[in-house]
Image (cartoon, helix red, strand yellow):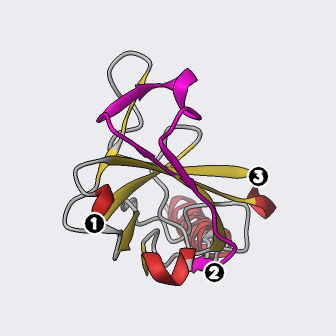
């Protein structure tokens, strides 16, 4: 009986040490949300990022837009559109209404983006239709590019048209 008690105590001590070690390794492996590591979605919140563009000129109201950027150090592309997994091979574009467009942000692998990074706009394209085939992505009515950085926090950012394109 004495040996069984000692064995039980030893096993309990080993289990406690193993649990403590597992917790230390789990905390060490967590991303701090700084956005500098390989994970484009730090913090693990599973949220869904958006880019809100305000002050869009009135002539584009009632049209649709597609947004693209990338984070070079992570080798990922980010697209702003209504839905990434759209019907067939079409892209569902973001509507422009009252001088405003709210782009849902998708990474090229189909996951939502919600990281903390600064990046420039590759382009915003304006279309007349709410969806387009993937292979017609570059057949837009208008193309706008900017070198002004956008800082995303938890995958979201808001900028005014005039700050980016004037």
Determine whether label 2 and label 3 are within 8 Å by CB.
no
**Residue found 52% across the figure and 62% down from its top:** 8
**Looking at the image, residue 108 lies above or below residue 102:** above
Residue 35: x, y in percent? 65, 74
Sequence-wise first label, 3 or 1:
1
Residue marked by disc 2: 34
**Residue found 59% across the figure and 35% down from its top:** 138
Segment colored magenta: 125-150
Residue marked by disc 3: 75
* In front: label 2 or label 3: 3
Residue 106: x, y in percent? 48, 48
Secondary structure, mark 1, is helix
Query: What is the CA distance from the residue labelled 3 to the residue labelled 1?
Result: 35 Å
Q: Residue furthest right?
A: 73
Which quadrant is home to the C terminus?
A: bottom right
Secondary structure, mark 3, is loop
- The answer to which image quadrant residue 84 occupies is top left
* In front: label 3 or label 1: 1
Residue 161: x, y in percent? 44, 75
Circle 3 Cα neighbour tier, 10 Å, few/some/many (<14 / 14–19 / ≥20)? few
In this rendering, position of residue 8 left or right of residue 26 = left
Can you see residue 21?
no
In this rendering, position of residue 47 left or right of residue 147 = left
Residue 70: x, y in percent? 67, 57
Query: What is the CA distance from the residue labelled 1 to the residue labelled 2?
Result: 37 Å
**Residue found 48% across the figure and 79% down from its top:** 153
Q: Nearer the viewer, residue 28 or 2?
A: 28
**Residue found 29% across the figure and 47% down from its top:** 63
Residue marked by disc 1: 58
Query: What is the CA distance from the residue labelled 2 to the residue labelled 3?
Result: 17 Å
- The answer to which image quadrant residue 139 occupies is top right
């Amino acid at each position: 009986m004495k040996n069984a008690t000692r064995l039980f105590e030893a096993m309990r001590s080993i289990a406690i040490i193993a649990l403590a070690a597992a917790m230390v390794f789990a905390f060490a492996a967590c991303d701090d949300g700084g956005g500098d590591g390989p994970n484009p979605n730090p913090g693990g919140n599973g949220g869904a990022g958006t880019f809100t563009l305000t002050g869009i000129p009135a002539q584009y109201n009632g049209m649709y837009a597609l947004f693209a950027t990338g984070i070079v150090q992570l080798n990922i592309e980010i697209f702003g559109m209504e839905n990434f997994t759209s019907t067939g091979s079409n892209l569902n574009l973001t509507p422009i209404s009252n001088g405003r467009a709210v782009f849902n942000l998708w990474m090229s692998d189909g996951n939502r983006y919600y990281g903390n990074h600064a990046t420039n706009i590759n382009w915003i394209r304006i279309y007349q239709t709410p969806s387009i085939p993937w292979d017609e992505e570059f057949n837009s009515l208008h193309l706008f590019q900017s070198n002004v950085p956008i800082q995303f926090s938890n995958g979201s950012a808001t900028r005014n048209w005039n700050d980016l394109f004037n």
